[in-house]
Amino acid sequence: MSGSILVVDDDSAIRTVVAAALKREGHRVTTAASIAEFRREFRLARPDVLVTDVVLPDGNGLDLVSSLLGEHPDLPVIIFSAQNTLATAVRATEVGAFDYLPKPFDLDALAQAVRGAIAKGRRGPAGAAEAELIGGPSLIGRSPAMQEVYRVIARVVSNDLTVLVMGESGTGKELVAQAIHDMGPRKRAPFVALNMAAIPRELIEAELFGHERGAFTGAAARVAGKFEQAAGGTLFLDEIGDMPMDAQTRLLRVLQSGEFTTVGGARPIRADVRIVAATNKELSTLVAAGQFREDLFYRLNVVPIALPSLRERRQDIALLARHFLDRAAEDGLPRKQLDADAVAVLERYDWPGNVRQLENLMRRIAALSRDEWVDAAGIRRALGEASVHGSAPDARDPGIETAVRARLDRIAIEDPDALDDGGLYDRIIGEVERPLIEAMLARHGHNQLRAARALGINRNTLRKRLDTLGIDVAGGVNGAGRPDGAE
Ligand SMILES: Nc1ncnc2c1ncn2[C@@H]1O[C@H](COP(=O)(O)OP(=O)(O)OP(=O)(O)O)[C@@H](O)[C@H]1O
């Protein structure tokens, strides 16, 4: 389906490339380099779709779209921008854009967006009235992976769909939940969080739904639960995978009926909350293992947001690191700067504790490093200290270091040639790996699937390592009896 498209961008190279790509798709294309040119072209061309940049020489594309859609509410608009922030993505949705493409975008994505715009007509939230740039917690990051996250957030802020945020610990799951709350219509009501892993299991239901006076021993007064505290706002259920089965059943009932009762209470109360749940565990695995209700999983997983680990968005590391140093300075700590080598070390590191670990490290550096400029050695030192002090999830056990050194000393005495023959790495790693794998197999009843899961490796990888290391599994239950790790 072809149509007439008006492309507004002050960069002539982008105008040319975009126009050529859209013409190849069979569309008629006109271009404009400014808002003034746009006004002229718009009257003449009467386009089916408008594609516009945000920063234009004589004004802001978002304001333009906002006022334009007041007059032409059915015009589908695609906004592209190099201002790849969550605020831009959300504002684009708020002003009623049909789609938002962060720059650099690929031409296929644009062509597809244009096809969608022509086929479906304008569909964004009605009205341009609420076009207000909202602050809120800043999610930092311009990587493609985070752009995708922003796009999903932008689509859900104005509705009440249940969102499930998945990601490793420290990737910013709570910050995403907070951003969804702060940017949506519930922002003036409370954002209430409950971490399922942090409260005793037997108290979870009372925490969620509240309890009446005398509902159980020690319940001296009526206490409102999180559902009541969050009324009108957002309830963030963290570590949902740790929710006990009974509580899961009750939560499911509440999600289905839209009502809950307090523990010991009889009168149903309307549940007026938007639910955002988060997990760092693979919920589908828990479902398969019978530890999480499948029906609840589907109820929660209406809009999934997969937050990438920090090592999957390394190009955000420098930006985040500088942001955390700025924040530390705002909090009164000395201002520090990172030199290029320092940034390179940060970008190469694997960040098992993700953004939280980077944030802690930057605060540590702000507080402890002596010079204003931090170099590579400064970062390595801080990383080393953090792990020895156990404040990072990658804390190295100094005992292992001592053991490895002692082993090398021994090899130097018993088999000095081995130190130079090139097989040392495999030999030492094999020596560490063997007891690790054997211990995990024993711990998990020789069930390979569970042992592999606990080690965080693929089952086939474990099998290969068992072969390579010559670990005998035939005697184990798994070797003969449970080839698939069935439980
Ligand atoms: N994209 C980001 N921009 C700025 N700060 C971030 C970002 N992501 C995470 N942070 C910061 O990192 C810290 C950890 O984030 P958060 O608590 O949201 O992670 P989480 O995934 O919920 O962790 P957990 O699973 O351990 O609860 C917070 O201080 C948060 O402000």
Image: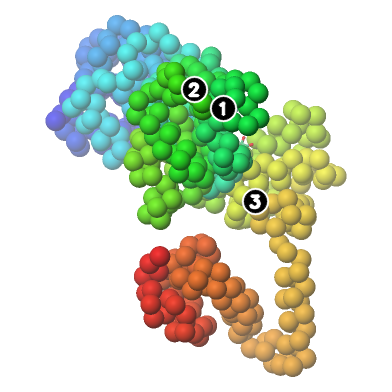
First of labels 2, 3 by sequence position: 2
Left or right, 428 with respect to 115, comes to: right
Label 2 packing within 10 angstroms: few (<14), some (14-19), many (20+): some
The residue that disc 1 covers is 215
- Left/right placement of residue 102 relative to residue 176 reads left
Q: Which residue is mark 2?
A: 265
Residue 207 picture location, percent across and down: 57, 30
- Mark 1 and mark 2: span between their CA atoms? 8 Å
Q: Which mark is residue 26?
A: none
**Tag 1 and tag 2, C-beta contact below 8 Å:** yes
Task: Please name the residue that numbered disc 3 is placed on.
Answer: 346
Which of the 4 image quadrants contains residue 329? top right
Residue furthest out toward the top: 71
Amino acid type shown at disc 1: Ala
The amino acid at mark 3 is Leu
Q: Position of residue 169 (x, y in %)?
A: 57, 46
Q: 405 above or below 89?
A: below
Distance of mark 3 from mark 1, alpha carbons? 53 Å
Three-letter residue code for mark 2: Gly
